[in-house]
Image: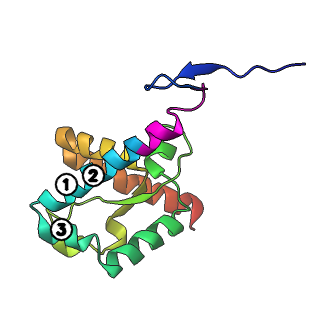
């Protein structure tokens, strides 16, 4: 039996496998553009105090501990959408701009993926207190089910 891979065109016109998003040449260009965007963003940030905090050893250690404690699981996806998604960041439930003293509190950390983190910030715009309450209840539920 012969299996034929489905093909498509990259944005540059090169034929690539359907499962690929870009050819290697375009992928390198896109990655370089992303790096340049991030470099520009990092240089033009106005909230220096907060930005510097995310580079500290204390934050890096706490973030790693939070992710390990919650088994690298995006708890929002798990409890709200019934999906298993890998967590790669730790969200401050009460944002550090709102309460600087809670920046290194374990109980104020919520493990999530980057896309969930962005979603949470959008939800904060509509109902910050309600979403914070939801995140805290999700943490409690996880601890009751898996850590007791």
Taking the image as drawn, is residue 80 in sight?
no
| Residue at 32% over, 53% down | 35
Q: Secondary structure at mark 1?
A: helix
Rendered-image quadrant of the N terminus: top right
Q: Which numbered disc flags the more N-terminal residue, 1 or 3?
A: 1
| Residue at 53% over, 52% down | 86
Q: Position of residue 70 (x, y in %)?
A: 51, 63
Cβ–Cβ under 8 Å for marks 2 and 1: yes
- Label 3 belongs to which residue? 50
Whether residue 49 appears in magenta in the rendering, the answer is: no
- Label 2 belongs to which residue? 36
- Side of 76 relative to 146 (left or right): left
- Label 1 belongs to which residue? 40
Question: Which residues lie in the magenta part?
Answer: 16-28
**Relative to 104, is 38 above or below?**
above
Rendered-image quadrant of the C terminus: bottom right
All told, the count of numbered labels is 3
Cβ–Cβ under 8 Å for marks 3 and 2: no
Q: Nearer the viewer, mark 1 or mark 3?
A: 1
Image quadrant where residue 8 sits:
top right
**Relative to 97, is 104 above or below?**
below
Q: Secondary structure at mark 2?
A: helix
Q: Position of residue 124 (x, y in %)?
A: 22, 45
Q: Nearer the viewer, mark 3 or mark 2?
A: 2
Residue closest to the eye, 138 or 101? 101
Q: Which numbered disc flags the more N-terminal residue, 3 or 2?
A: 2
| Residue at 25% over, 46% down | 121
Taking the image as drawn, is residue 87 in sight?
yes
| Residue at 33% over, 80% down | 58
């Amino acid at each position: 039996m012969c299996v034929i891979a489905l093909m498509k065109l990259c944005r540059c016109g090169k034929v690539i496998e359907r499962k690929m998003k870009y050819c290697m040449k375009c992928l390198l260009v896109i990655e370089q553009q992303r790096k340049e965007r991030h470099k520009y963003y990092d240089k033009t940030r106005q909230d220096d105090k907060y930005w510097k905090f995310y580079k500290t050893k204390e934050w890096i250690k706490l973030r790693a501990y939070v992710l390990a404690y919650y088994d690298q699981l995006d708890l929002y996806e798990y409890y709200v959408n019934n999906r298993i998604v890998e967590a790669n960041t730790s969200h401050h439930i009460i944002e550090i701009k709102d309460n600087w003293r809670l920046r290194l509190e374990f109980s104020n950390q919520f493990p999530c993926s980057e896309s969930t983190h962005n979603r949470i910030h959008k939800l904060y715009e509509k109902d910050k207190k309600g979403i914070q309450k939801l995140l805290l209840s999700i943490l409690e539920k996880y601890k009751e089910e898996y850590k007791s």
